[in-house]
Amino acid sequence: MQQKSLVLDTNILLRAIFGVRVIALLETYQDSIAFYTPALCFSEAEAHLPAIASRRGADTARGFRYLARLAELVETIDSSLYEAHEATARQRMASRDLADWPIAATALLLDCPIWTEDQDFFGAGIATWTTANVELYLRDA
């Protein structure tokens, strides 16, 4: 049987850094679920981390430590691996947020759902899970 997998959006990475539930789910299911994200999502999380930490009064250094921990739990997918799905992903995201096409392309490459809070993926023809319900998917692994 093939291992279940999920593609994480940038907002899920940021929730893992600044929240409790996402990191707990990733650590709980790391042995039974393969977690992936495009390299772009780690770059975006790294870029947004200082401003979010400042707004929340959180320790930026601690945020970067959590980001490093995420890199151990979530496999980074290089753009060279999903670029063959770019045209299809762009078509699916065209009426939504075109900047999210790498996430859609990664999900198409891996034939798996996206874990996101971004409603721009809804209706794009790719299964999505929000944090509120993702454990239903995870625990059936």
Image (cartoon, helix red, strand yellow):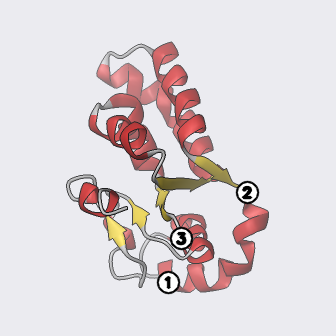
Q: Earlier in the sequence, mark 2 or mark 1?
A: 2
Say which amino acid is labelled 3. Answer: Gln
Dot 2, crowdedness within 10 Å: few (<14), some or many (≥20)?
Answer: some
For residue 120, side relative to residue 39 (left or right): left
- List the single residue furthest toward the right: 80
Q: Looking at the rendered structure, which numbered label has been put on residue 78?
A: 2
- Tell me: residue 92, above or below residue 20: below
Q: Nearer the viewer, residue 38 or 56?
A: 38
Q: Earlier in the sequence, mark 1 or mark 3?
A: 3
Say which amino acid is labelled 2. Answer: Asp
Q: Position of residue 117 (x, y in %)?
A: 31, 57
Q: Residue at x 30, y 22 (%)?
A: 56
Q: Nearer the viewer, residue 23 or 93?
A: 23
Q: Earlier in the sequence, mark 2 or mark 3?
A: 3
The residue that label 3 is drawn on is: 2
Q: Nearer the viewer, residue 68 or 96?
A: 68
Q: Nearer the viewer, residue 85 or 113?
A: 113
Mark 1 element type:
helix
- Tell me: residue 73, above or below residue 2: above
Dot 3, crowdedness within 10 Å: few (<14), some or many (≥20)?
Answer: few
Say if mark 2 contacts mark 3, CB within 8 Å: no
Q: Position of residue 121 (x, y in %)?
A: 39, 71
Q: Nearer the viewer, mark 2 or mark 1?
A: 2
